[in-house]
Image (cartoon, helix red, strand yellow):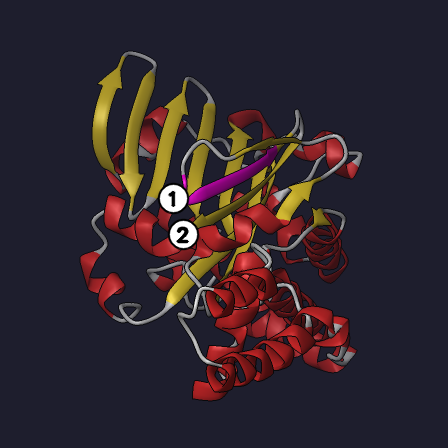
Amino acid sequence: MYDTIKFVIKESDLDNAICFLEEIPCRISIKSTSSNRVVGFLKNMKIEVRNTTLIVQGSLLKYFKGYNYAECLSVWDVRKSINKLSNELNVPMRQAVINRIDIGICFSMVNVPWVYWDCLLHSDGYFRSNIKQETLYFDKYDSQLCFYDKKTEMKKNREVENLECLKKINVLRYEFRFKKVTSIFGGVVRGADLYSPVFYLRVLQKWYDGYMIIQKGFVSEVDLLRFGGKKEFQRSCVALVMGQFNLYEVLDREFAQGKINSKNKYDIKEVMKEAEKLLLDKENFISIIDELTNKVSVFYEEMKKSVENVSPYRWDLLNRMADRSLRV
């Protein structure tokens, strides 16, 4: 669930005396340095030391799993990944202040992702932006919802190896980005909070609510199409044409001009009557956005249960197992 996280920690926050400018450079791949600043990377995580402040930012999921498209981090995975980061930097990142949190998940969809954008219409307080076809934003000062084509992003980042396994599917990613963490949660959030069950569920709830409050519409050109079989597809195509103009009038004109005989007219009319049922049958008129909404709901319920259905004994056991290798 968690993706990009921004950790900020000061030397004064630590119990033990440490100099970041001396300790951190030997543990990362350095990209640039100056008298009081070091910038580099630890795997995918960007590491920056500014005097006595350490800033770590990047995808926690990608750091821990190596990718961020197929799975999400459980509460214990979050704990283990933060412990791993702490060990590699020799800094207790559980004490760091969290300045940004991105959470998201990828969904395998029937259609290419951008088809769904026209169905996501409006969310109060957010500015809707669809500058590029493959990305849709709902933005405000403290948070942002982002929907995008994950495969397009991976191509842009040249993740060729990972892209191969997604070749035959459409991958839509929905992220909720907390830009002002302290403001949204009403207080300072630290690294250890990320694997707190209570906080984890709060973040999950905001991700879910963020999507659900979006006003949704439908795209009739796509929603009318049915792919259950040859006849169903043909009927839906006729319904699509009937939705654009008066096909009965066209049929009468063609008959009057002698272009079709009475039998042709009767047969075509029967097909049109069947197609008309699709236009009038509101119960079967399901918007394509329902596909995404259902996937969001299922994921939300599964993640919620994965936290709520764990006994106190198992929580304690899993936490101890996650902390087994922690050195700082």
**As drawn, 34 above or below 214:** above
Q: Is residue 259 a member of the stretch shown in magenta? A: no
Residue extending furthest toward the right? 186
What residue range appears in magenta?
A: 133-138
Res 70 quadrant in image: bottom left
Residue 278, how many percent across, how many down?
65, 75
The residue depicted at 40 percent of the width and 52 percent of the height is 149
Which residue is labeled 2 in the image?
149
Depth check: give the residue in front, 220 or 162: 220
Classified by dominant secondary structure, the portion drawn in magenta counts as strand
Which residue is labeled 1 in the image?
89
Depth check: give the residue in front, 21 or 160: 160
Determine if residue 75 is in view: no
Residue 287, how many percent across, how many down?
64, 63
Residue 187 appears left or right of 204: right
Q: Secondary structure at mark 2?
A: strand
Q: Quadrant of the N terminus?
A: bottom right
Q: Amino acid at mark 2?
A: Asp
Residue 202 appears left or right of 7: right
The residue depicted at 63 percent of the width and 58 percent of the height is 195
Q: Amino acid at mark 1?
A: Leu
- How far apart marks 1 and 2 lie (CA) works out to 33 Å
In front: label 1 or label 2? 2
